[in-house]
Amino acid sequence: MKPILLQLSDFILYSYPLFMGLAWGVSYNLTKSLLSEDGYTLKNFNLLYFSTFVVSWIGAKALFLSASSENMMDQYLNSSNFWLGGGFVFYGGLLFGLVYLFIFCKLLNLFSAKKLYLFIPGLTFGHAIGRVGCFLAGCCYGTICELPWAIDLHDHLRHPVQLYEALSLGILGFLILKMIKFKAEASFIVRFYLISYSIIRFILEYFRGDKIRGVHDYGTTSQYISLIILSIVLIEIIYSKIIKRQSQ
């Protein structure tokens, strides 16, 4: 754990906000590059990207408040440190972002929904970088273990679950980039991402040791959401195949 990377007199460089900034910066530039390589106009891209950033930020905070705040909601709501600092649930940002993208692309017709799959590699690699920030900050920590690669965190040896997720997301992002390179269908790429991450997150929640994320009798908030997303995607795949057979 290294929440402070550098301190010079009154200047303090914190690891978590630095890696959050890196995550969004990498995501922005990678997405912009993929859209340019695809030959798509970048009109409204900056507006879409940065407005999605704001909406996703709010969504990640909102799910944290509803799932993880317990009796501290008033304290969080009245704290500028909360709104500008840590305290996120990724799925909240993802779900709010998807709803906003639907409005921006489908209802307002300001961007082509057919090109949104090109945002997925940036999302995935950005998420991976963010998890490294979590590791350095000491949040989202793992359960106690005695494995050779366990890390000393919060007075115990623990699973470096943040790095497990960062590595899994890095591999997932690499695979998706390969799919884009070889012109896989956009619908396949979207489904692949949603199914893969839902499975990754569901499994890794068993290695999480922090209780603040929302732990219930039969699982965590993120495990429930993972199952819902996985079920929706699988139902959509089955429905699409049925429709396709009927049209033949």
Image (cartoon, rainbow, N blue to C red):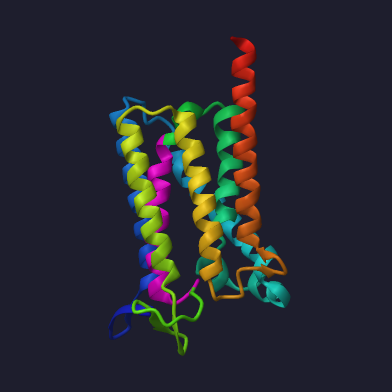
What residue appears at the point 55 percent right and 49 percent down from the top-left corner? 94
Name the quadrant containing residue 189. top left
What residue appears at the point 47 percent right and 86 percent down from the top-left corner? 154
| Quadrant for the C terminus in the image | top right
Q: Furthest-bottom residue in view? A: 155
| Numbered label tally | 0
Residue in the foreground of this view, choosing between 12 and 209 = 209
Name the quadrant containing residue 63. bottom right
Q: Which residues are magenta?
A: 118-140
In the image, is 196 to the left or to the right of 71?
Answer: left
Dominant SS in magenta: helix
What residue appears at the point 56 percent right and 58 percent down from the top-left corner? 202
Up-down relation of residue 137 to residue 57 (above or below): below
Up-down relation of residue 179 to residue 241 (above or below): below
- Residue 40: image x %, image y %? 36, 26
Q: Furthest-top residue in view? A: 248
In the image, is 132 to the left or to the right of 246?
Answer: left
Residue in the foreground of this view, choosing between 8 and 139 = 139
Residue 218 magenta: no
In the image, is 64 to the left or to the right of 146?
Answer: right
- Residue 144: image x %, image y %? 49, 81
What residue appears at the point 51 percent right and 37 percent down from the top-left corner? 191
Residue 112: in sight, yes or no? Answer: no
Residue 60: in sight, yes or no? Answer: yes
- Residue 174: image x %, image y %? 32, 46
| Quadrant for the N terminus in the image | bottom left
In the image, is 56 to the left or to the right of 29?
Answer: right
- Residue 175: image x %, image y %? 35, 43
Residue in the foreground of this view, choosing between 213 and 151 = 151
